[in-house]
Image: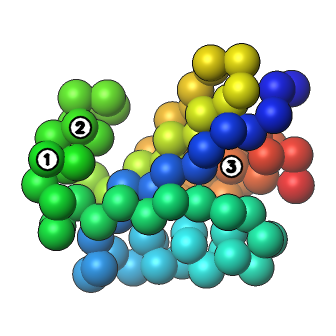
Amino acid sequence: MAQIKEFKIYSTPTCGYCHMLKEWLTEKKVAFTDINVAADPARGVEMIQKTGQMGVPVSVISFEDGKEEVVLGFDQERIAKILGI
């Protein structure tokens, strides 16, 4: 699998699953960029256009080869498989 270029999480401060996802990634030592869609509505529109979803968290994992994986919610099993952890 290609090298991970960027791991973005679209989230809100009041989302429990967002907090769980970020804590889990921190424990696994996975670097990520947190995008607070409540504070930046334009990024929320970006998330909806990319995924068709209004709910958070949304993880967008970009790879060096240009491919992208989008994970809706805190799907720990799928994210672990994508990351190889």
- How many callouts does the rendering have? 3
Q: Which residue is mark 2?
A: 46
Mark 1 and mark 2: span between their CA atoms? 6 Å
Give the residue drawn at x 42%, y 50%: 58
Q: Amino acid at mark 1?
A: Ala
Sort mark 2 into few (<14), some (14-19) or many (20+) by Cα contacts within 10 Å: few
Assess disc 3: are there few (<14), some (14-19) or many (≥20) residues with their C-alpha within 10 Å of its C-alpha.
some
Residue 81 at what x, y percent from top left? 80, 43
Is 13 on the left-hand or right-hand side of 8? left
Residue depicted at x 67% and y 38%: 5
Viewport quadrant of the N terminus: top right
Disc 2 to disc 3: CB gap under 8 Å: no
Instruction: Reply above or below: 17 against 51.
Output: below
Circle nearer the viewer, 1 or 3 = 1
Front residue (pair 28, 77): 28
Q: CA distance from mark 2 to mark 3?
A: 21 Å
Residue annotated with mark 1: 42
* Quadrant, the C terminus: bottom right
Label 3 sits on residue: 79
> Is 51 positioned to the left or the right of 43 in the image?
right
Q: What's the colour scheme?
A: rainbow
Instruction: Please tell me which residue is depicted at 79% across the width and 46% down the height of the picture.
Output: 83
SS at mark 2 in the image: helix
